[in-house]
Image (cartoon, helix red, strand yellow):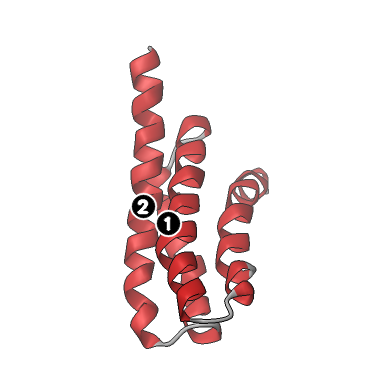
Amino acid sequence: MKEIKKWSIYLIGPIICFYILPMLIRDTGSAMFVLLGVIPVLCFVNGLYYGLKENKVLVYSLLVGLLFLPTIFLFYNSSATVYTVIFTFLSFLGGMSGKGILWLKK
């Protein structure tokens, strides 16, 4: 139960990014801004924060990717499946950057 509570704190950010931000999309320009600008940056920053605080960066990144999968059917079309890999990778890259920062501090 403790593990679920700990993970849920860090998964709130991606849930807001994936499920709330698409509701603000009104046209193609705003969709591209959100998908190519806002969500990738937030995934990286959230992964960085997670990497600074916790372990198991790979599992966390996979959870971020799994959280994005339902949004493909809810908000986008099947061409958005590539973003699952991109957001998972950015989350992993952020987490590993956080681990690298901790390693450099020691």
Quadrant where the image shows the C terminus: top left
Q: Label for residue 40?
A: 1
Q: Farthest residue to the top: give it.
A: 106
Q: Residue at position x 48%, y 31% from top?
A: 52
Taking the image as shown, residue 36 lies to the left or right of residue 71, namely left
* On screen, residue 47 above or below 64: above
12 or 76, which is in the foreground? 76
Q: In the figure, residue 81 lies in which quadrant? A: bottom left
Looking at the image, can residue 97 be seen? Answer: yes
Q: Secondary structure at mark 1?
A: helix
Q: In the figure, residue 103 lies in which quadrant? A: top left
Mark 1 and 2 residues: CB-CB less than 8 Å, in contact?
yes
Q: In the figure, residue 14 lies in which quadrant? A: bottom right
Q: Position of residue 54 (x, y in %)?
A: 50, 35
Q: Residues within 10 Å of mark 1 (few under 14, many from 20)?
A: many
* On screen, residue 3 above or below 87: above
* On screen, residue 101 above or below 15: above
Q: Position of residue 60 (x, y in %)?
A: 46, 51
* On screen, residue 100 above or below 21: above
Looking at the image, can residue 63 be seen? Answer: no
Q: Residue at position x 43%, y 71% from top?
A: 32
Which residue is tagged 2?
Answer: 90
Q: Secondary structure at mark 2?
A: helix
Q: Label for residue 52?
A: none
Number of marks drawn: 2
